């Protein structure tokens, strides 16, 4: 597609429920990133994929968070047993270059999924 | 650790006013600096960037100069328009790794 597509746009989950958030990166983009943006804050890094390989998951806040990209294109971020502190906008970004390209390269971000845990 | 600090909002300006949004950073090495903009209901869009000291990034009338001596990357625009209303994020990317470090964002509203 023309841009990074995320679904659903909004998700309301009851505390303890599992959720799955989807990201469709730009076709052919090898690098894919997930960020978490809490209300009133800037996005914070969660994890990075190069093709299907998850090369960095240092930002995942707990073992309840799990991400996959099995075929090197679509990615899913899964949160198990959601808690209220998981409420945030989850952003996906992609880049055509491995490693996200050179240090001066920006990424293309999706519009995000707003997760509200009640 | 590496971080970005930007001025708190919200900022409200009249059309054609001058805009400055301050941004300072803390990082080891020589990061690249970015401004991203987020319009309502949309994703982050790259507005401009600078990759080394004294570089000036510019786009759509916005400018920012990479000042290593003051560790700053302030965003400026000489005459804002209603369509500039958005949230602006300052960010850095280190020359090692691929993460972006974002500031908390500054909301700008321009009134006619």
Image: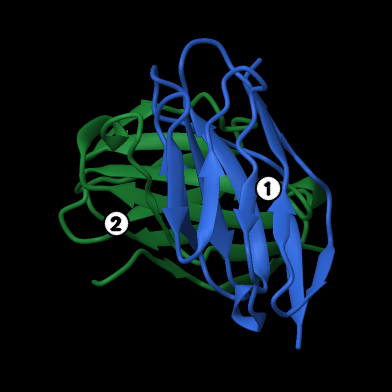
Q: Is residue A110 left or right of residue A9?
A: left
Q: Which mark is residue A22?
A: none
Q: How is the image coloured?
A: by chain
Query: Which residue is rendered at x = 22% and y = 34% of the image?
Result: A98
Chain B takes which shade in the image? blue
- The residue where tag 2 is placed is A74
Instruction: Decide which of A88, A70 is in the foreground and name it.
Output: A88
Q: Check the residue under mark 1 and report the chain it is in.
A: A
Q: Check the residue under mark 2 and report the chain it is in.
A: A
- The residue where tag 1 is placed is A81
Give the crowd class for mark 1: few <14, some 14-19, many >=20 residues within 10 Å: some
Q: Is residue B50 left or right of residue B7?
A: left
Residue A8 lies, with reference to residue B4, above or below; the image says below
Instruction: Decide which of A116, B102 is in the foreground and name it.
Output: B102
Residue B27 lies, with reference to residue A37, above or below; the image says above
Q: Is residue B23 visible?
A: yes
Q: Residue furthest bottom?
A: B112
Q: Which chain is green?
A: A
Assign a secondary structure to mark 2.
loop
Query: Which residue is rendered at x = 25% and y = 45% of the image?
Result: A70
Q: Position of residue B63 (x, y in %)?
A: 53, 51
Q: Position of residue B59 (x, y in %)?
A: 43, 59
């Amino acid at each position: 597609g023309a841009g990074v597509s995320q679904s659903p746009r909004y998700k309301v989950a009851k505390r303890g429920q599992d959720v799955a958030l989807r990201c469709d990166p730009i076709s052919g983009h090898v690098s894919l990133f997930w960020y978490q943006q809490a209300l009133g804050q800037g996005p914070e890094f969660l994890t990075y994929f190069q093709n299907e390989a998850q090369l960095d998951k240092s930002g995942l806040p707990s073992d309840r968070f799990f991400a996959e990209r099995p075929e090197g294109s679509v990615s899913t971020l899964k949160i198990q047993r959601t808690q209220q502190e998981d409420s945030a906008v989850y952003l996906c970004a992609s880049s055509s270059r491995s490693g996200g390209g050179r240090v001066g390269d920006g990424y293309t971000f999706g519009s995000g999924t707003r997760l509200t845990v009640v | 650790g590496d971080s970005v600090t930007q001025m708190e909002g919200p900022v409200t300006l009249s059309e054609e006013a001058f805009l400055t949004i301050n941004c300072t950073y803390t990082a080891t090495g020589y990061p690249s600096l970015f401004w991203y903009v987020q319009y309502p209901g949309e994703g982050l869009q790259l507005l401009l960037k600078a990759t080394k000291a004294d570089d000036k990034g510019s786009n759509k009338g916005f400018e920012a100069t990479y000042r290593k001596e003051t560790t700053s990357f302030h965003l400026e625009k000489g005459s804002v328009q209603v369509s500039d209303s958005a949230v602006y994020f300052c960010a850095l990317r280190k020359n090692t790794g691929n993460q972006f470090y974002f500031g908390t964002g500054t909301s700008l509203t321009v009134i006619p």
